[in-house]
Image (tube, grey):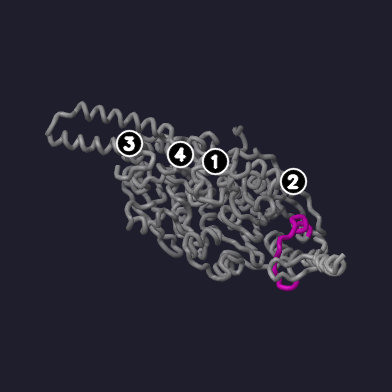
Amino acid sequence: MTVTLDFEKSIGELESKLAELRHMASTGEMDIASEVKRLQDKTEKLLAKTYKTLTPWQKVQVARHPERPHTGNYIDALITDFTPLAGDRTFAEDAAIVGGLGRFRGQPVVVMGHEKGRDTDLRIKHNFGMPRPEGYRKAARLMQLADRFKLPVITFVDTAGAHPGIDAEERGQSEALARCLEISAAVNVPILTTIIGEGGSGGAIALAFANVVMMLEHSIYSVISPEGCASILWRTRDKKEEAAIAQKLTAQDLKQFGIIDRIIPEPLGGAQRSPATIIQSVGDALEKALKPLLSLDGKVVRSQRRAKFLAMGRSGLA
Amino acid sequence: MSWFTTFVRPRINALMRKQEIPDDLWHKCSSCEQMIYHKDLVSHQYVCRHCGHHMRIPLKMRFETLFDAGSYTRVPLPKVLLDPLKFKDSKKYADRLKVARLETKEEDAILVAEGYMGGYPVVLAAFDFSFIGGSMGMAVGEGLVRAAERACELKSAYITLPSSGGARMQEGIFSLMQMPRSVIAVEQVKEAGLPYITILVNPTMGGVAASFAMLGDIAIAEPGAIIGFTGARVLQETIRQELPPGFQEANFQLAHGMVDMVTPREDIRQKLIDILGVLMSKK
């Protein structure tokens, strides 16, 4: 880990001490195996304790952690024969949403998701995962392609929201989002969504109108960012921690509300600490969720998707 | 006593009195600030006769001006669970709701009515901006779903008239879910072969614009209506750049291909009848 969150200071100190010891052990200068073991246990205990009791705001920070695996990492690891596809055929290519054709554990699929980018250059290229209208139009185009060839759609959500800009407004940001939802409602193939980090607002729901919606244990999903919510309702962004609590944006809250179907547990200390483990878990969860949908008729899949959203909030709430 | 009490004070009082105009008699245009006689305001459907500015019209008056002979039936809407998040900022959301209900004498920010326009059957779902900014929460979403269902039952046209700042933040994720839900409603109407028409009224923003409001077979905007996804204040704070004049106004959306027409309020009824005539009459 190179980025330590503010509430992880003591964990970070332990981790760097541990790394130092391991280095010393590997150079064979001393036999410090027992010391390494002791430190490792201590770190793990502290990690487990910290991550078990994350506050909503701490979850927001974890969900946005720069070292969490991104859509690109999931595609690289889970999709074989991947052919990236580009462009909305109207105006431009928008790399804030990446996607294409491939195979998921043998099953031909269309895959797409928000990509935030890993370093400064890539973040700019992917516009920090905030799509312009072209991104949503590309997503809609890929869904229609999936529909035509009866391919399930796998989406990964990781976005602060739709890009706020004059250009986006000029080219119909709201129309592009709305059309993406309309096409999500219309397609006769399964859509499976995993919220891997930040599920921000309209920008998230555009890729999350799905038969199955899963969330990583420490990911978040909300109508507006806690900062935005605080700025509007409390009139100051400083109240973001209170806003994060009030919004009930954690996977655990949303599962209880019936908004999402499944929580995918994260490895000790969050997805960012062992990307390979979480990607494997997501793959397994996707495979399990996809299986029963594959045998269903397309029309049934579509009406199941609609019925699921129509039922939301109608019952089961105290 | 002195010249002040006997002479100046009555004069001052007289001056003050002159400016005290009864609320119900005169209105000031919120754009050009000219005075408008109440009867003129009503007969012009709350459009300023001096400058053409479209002011907010009481929703029931709007219904009366749109439906044949001003006659319509309110469609009862299902009850929804209130305050799912038990939300509290500086005030409890439950209390905000109570106040809005007392002030508007309505359950929430949407009213649905059925009736006829030019003899064509119509279900109209209209937003009340005075109810928490016309924001879309569960009650509004359920209203839109019910309105679309009713349109399908009656084989009516479905018309929505949004006037909303966007999602109702106090309902959190449940307000976000009204985007796909309202879109499902639109799809049901479209799949039944019925027309879906939108009348975009100031303001049509955020999650409301980015769902059912932008999916009309035909989209009509009122002059001056602000229509868009990200609001001007947030945009300016983010990009720190002046917005071009007329940004996100109805004519801007017309020029960018997002609406079919910008139609003055007093002409909208006839325009709807013309459109319904073409889309709904049997050949």
Within-10-Å neighbours for mark 4: few <14, some 14–19, many 20+: many
Percent x, y for residue A171?
50, 64
Q: Is residue A103 above or below residue B244?
A: above
Q: Is residue A23 shown to the viewer in this render? A: yes
> How many angstroms separate mark 1 from mark 2 (CA)?
25 Å
| Residue at point 66%, 65% (across, down) | B222
- The residue tagged 3 is A11
Within-10-Å neighbours for mark 1: few <14, some 14–19, many 20+: many
| Residue at point 36%, 44% (across, down) | A68
Percent x, y for residue B125?
69, 52
- The residue tagged 4 is A214
Disc nearer the start of the sequence (1/3): 3
Disc nearer the start of the sequence (1/4): 4
> How many angstroms separate mark 1 from mark 4 (CA)?
22 Å
Mark whose residue sits in front, 2 or 3: 3
Judged left or right of residue A181, residue A46 is left
Say whether marks 2 and 4 touch (CB < 8 Å).
Answer: no
Disc nearer the start of the sequence (4/3): 3
Secondary structure under the numbered disc 2 in the rendered image: helix
Query: In the rendered structure, which amino acid carries the disc numbered 1?
Result: Ala
Query: In the rendered structure, which amino acid carries the disc numbered 2?
Result: Leu
Mark whose residue sits in front, 4 or 3: 3
Image quarter of the C terminus of chain B? bottom right
Query: In the rendered structure, which amino acid carries the disc numbered 3?
Result: Ile
> Which of the chains bears the disc numbered 2?
B
